[in-house]
Amino acid sequence: MPEEITFKMMRESLYAAVVADSLDSLGLRYQSPRVPLQPYSGDSLLVGRCKTTLWADMYHEDPRPYELELKAVDSCRPDDVVIAAAHGSCHSALWGELLSTAARNTGCLGAIVDGAVRDVARLREMNFPVFARQTSVYDSQNRQRVADIDVPVEIGGVRFCPGDLVFADLDGIVVVPQKVEAEVIRRAWQKVHDENRTRDAIRDGMKATEAYEKFGVL
């Protein structure tokens, strides 16, 4: 076991499901939102720290359009992942090419949007990872706005706090509370390497039952 497991090491070896297994082992069994958040761009593991934004629907002219969302994007730091919590509302697209470009310039790695996004073709050209409920052609101006930033938010009943570690890939999204982060990552790292031994043994002809009895991993 290495003394420190860096973001680079996590991206090379871990994945969302094994992190969920590690959380399970600590009794934290509800750390992945059970809502359809699809990867609309990017096909590799997204790992970073939550930069949270809380969104609200609106039905009037906004006197200060985009104010807090621009502040949130400009205040991102390297290895951040924007969390846009909008209670699943698809009243408009919360995220698109321009915000992705501005966020990437700060070192932000991607966005998880509990709502709609647009400019998908360009997001794919950028290879900027974005997960969302669906797409929409509508701009957010006078339809939705950020009500608060850097506060705890919820997606599908799962809490995302500023600075929490988040993993997202084709299987889903998992958030790791900071208070258990070190232990969760340690257990995930160990399980990945135990799984590799199990996989190699089965590939070499060992029965699955025997492999599980020997290595205790499935």
Image (spheres, rainbow, N blue to C red):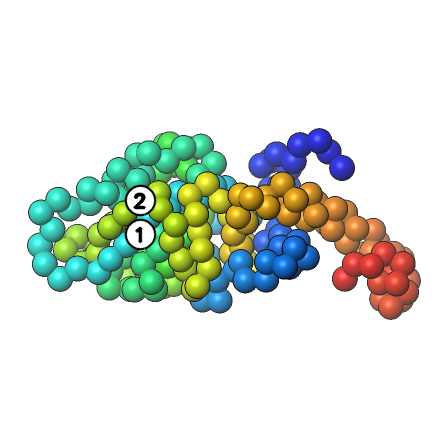
Image quadrant in which the N terminus is located = top right
Q: Residues within 10 Å of mark 2 (few under 14, many from 20)?
A: many
Q: Is residue 22 left or right of residue 176?
A: right
x and y percentages locating residue 92 in the rendered image: 24, 60
Identified at 52% across, 52% down, the residue is 175
Which residue is the site of mark 1?
54
Identified at 8% across, 54% down, the residue is 61
Mark 1 vs mark 2, CA separation in Å:
6 Å
The correct choice, above or below, for 134 with respect to 45 in the image is below
The correct choice, above or below, for 128 with respect to 143 in the image is above
Q: Secondary structure at mark 1?
A: strand
Q: Secondary structure at mark 2?
A: strand
x and y percentages locating residue 66 in the rendered image: 20, 45
Q: Are marks 1 and 2 in contact (CB under 8 Å)?
A: yes
What kind of residue is marked 1? Leu
Which residue is the site of mark 2?
149
Taking depth in this image into account, of 45 and 146 the one nearest to the observer is: 146
